[in-house]
Amino acid sequence: SQKIEQNSEALNIQEGKTATLTCNYTNYSPAYLQWYRQDPGRGPVFLLLIRENEKEKRKERLKVTFDTTLKQSLFHITASQPADSATYLCALDNDMRFGAGTRLTVKP
Amino acid sequence: NAGVTQTPKFRVLKTGQSMTLLCAQDMNHEYMYWYRQDPGMGLRLIHYSVGEGTTAKGEVPDGYNVSRLKKQNFLLGLESAAPSQTSVYFCASSPLVEQYFGPGTRLTVT
């Protein structure tokens, strides 16, 4: 069966550094992959979508890569700020299977 | 433009009671979804709809029913609540791909 995993439950980094979050999947070939941000007590908010034929997508300080050979997507936040602290979720196309999320904490 | 709204925000039920969660969207989206979110489990899809009058099962549909009589509304029903249904429930709508989530309903079944 399909499986989607995010590399760690929690990631702590220092302000100004680049945060890198990993999303791995198995037994599936998604047409695209999405990343969402979720703050405590709130619903997820869509950030970025990357298609299978795209290697990289950028939006302001965010960058997503998609490696269909490794079955992996990497989500980067450059020049991280305390306001970036949240849980980040990846999701496989319209099958809408979500990873459990990685809780990012950016310390000042 | 309210986006996606959910009613109620909190609810406590006793085992065996029934209730309906209401989701409404004002973005004219075709697709609507119901998820539950449990600690360490992430979001899991319960039911979804690809248009008015249609519904389909997701990953964890047992114990839930849904209806989409109007395009803007998607109802989630629990006929006989069980403690295992204690969770946070999120509704989402989508024009095609990216999803817009509501604020969630925290349900406790005792």
Image (tube, helix red, strand yellow):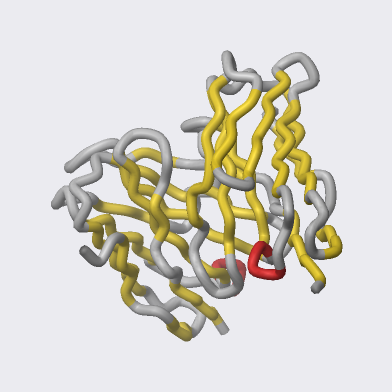
Q: How many marks?
A: 0
Q: Quadrant of the N terminus of chain A?
A: top right
Please report the residue visible at 56 percent of the width from the left and 28 percent of the height from the top. Answer: A50
A101 or A53: nearer the viewer: A53
Residue B100 image point, x, y percent:
39, 52
Whether residue B59 can be seen here: yes
A14 or B37: nearer the viewer: A14
Q: Quadrant of the C terminus of chain A?
A: bottom right
Residue B16 image point, x, y percent:
46, 76
Please report the residue visible at 76 percent of the width from the left and 14 percent of the height from the top. Answer: A69
Residue B110 image point, x, y percent:
57, 84
Name the image quarter holding residue A9.
bottom right
Could you tell whether A14 is left or right of B47 in the image?
right
Residue B37 vs A23, above or below: the answer is below
Could you tell whether A31 is left or right of B29 in the image?
right
A67 or A76: nearer the viewer: A76
Residue A1 vs A91, above or below: the answer is above
Residue B72 image point, x, y percent:
19, 54
Could you tell whether A5 is left or right of A14 in the image?
left
Residue A73 vs B1, above or below: the answer is above
Whether residue A97 can be seen here: no
Name the image quarter holding residue A5.
top right
